[in-house]
Image: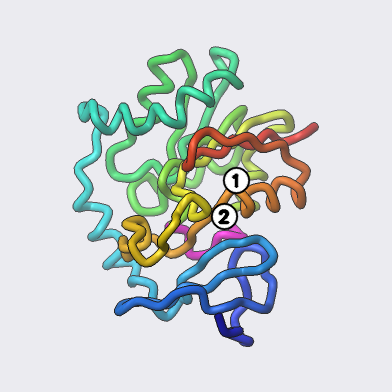
Amino acid sequence: MSNSGHESCPLCLHDELSLYFTDRRREYRLCPRCHLINVPPRFHLTATEERRRYESHRNSPADQGYRLFLRQLMRPLLDYLTPGQQGLDFGCGPGPTLSQMLQEQGYPMSVYDPFFADDTRVLTRQYDFITCTEAIEHFTQPAREWRRLLDLLVQGGHLAVMTRFHCSVTDFSDWYYKNDPTHIHFYSQATFAWLAQRDHLQVSFAGDSVAIFTKMP
């Protein structure tokens, strides 16, 4: 691995990244401090291309397979919640489903998505919990969005994130998750543990794709 020398980590802003992997379409760089793997901006899709890709998704509340997928996050999150607490689904996509599932469990929900639910009024208050499923890997400015998520959370609140952890991958070259052109940042348990330590959070993990943070009072 060679040092890139001129690019900083988009999450922790460390200024020395290493070239981790290259394929026919993109480069992937590794931060030695927070362990984030990122795709440099010159390989990112345009906003128009990105939106078109999302619009091709067919996820909806009527899709039982999609509901089963989202239960990977909902099940462990429910252990932290009290019915009636208010939540925000951040990055809900074109067919908000997790928010509906949580409402069915007794939790009032708001939704936000920069492409499909861009009502910034929901970002002017704080929430008891926030969900972010299969969205954090798309953020073009993860440092800014991470700080926004924490600011939207009350003291003692919970942030539940779902994204595939690259630490569970034995062969990055064959990893399907990196092949989606809208996936530009790849996290590991070490990344989230680093963020938790820096930002005074507690974190627990469920499987190889779910992290639940608690914002300490």
Which residues, given as a range, are shown in magenta? Answer: 138-145
Which secondary structure type mostly characterizes the magenta part of the structure?
helix
Please state which amino acid type lies under the numbered disc 1: Leu
Residue at the spot 77% in from the left edge and 34% down from the top edge: 216
Whole-percent x and y of residue 126?
Answer: 63, 35
Q: Is residue 143 magenta?
A: yes
The reply to whether the C-beta atoms of the residues labelled 1 and 2 are less than 8 Å apart is: yes
State the SS at label 1: helix
User: Which residue corresponds to mark 2?
Assistant: 145
Q: Out of 96 and 3, give the one closest to the viewer.
A: 3
Whole-percent x and y of residue 47?
Answer: 34, 67
Q: Residue 5 sits in which quadrant?
A: bottom right
Residue at the spot 40% in from the left edge and 78% down from the top edge: 22
Decide: is 5 above or below 163.
below
Residue at the spot 47% in from the left edge and 22% down from the top edge: 75
State the SS at label 2: helix
Q: Residues within 10 Å of mark 2 (few under 14, many from 20)?
A: some
Q: Out of 153 and 37, give the one closest to the viewer.
A: 37
Q: CA distance from mark 1 to mark 2?
A: 6 Å
Residue at the spot 43% in from the left edge and 22% down from the top edge: 102
Q: Is residue 103 magenta?
A: no
Decide: is 150 above or below 54.
above
User: Which residue corresponds to mark 1?
Assistant: 149
Query: In which quadrant of the rendered image does the N terminus lie?
Result: bottom right
Whole-percent x and y of residue 15?
Answer: 68, 77
Please state which amino acid type lies under the numbered disc 2: Glu
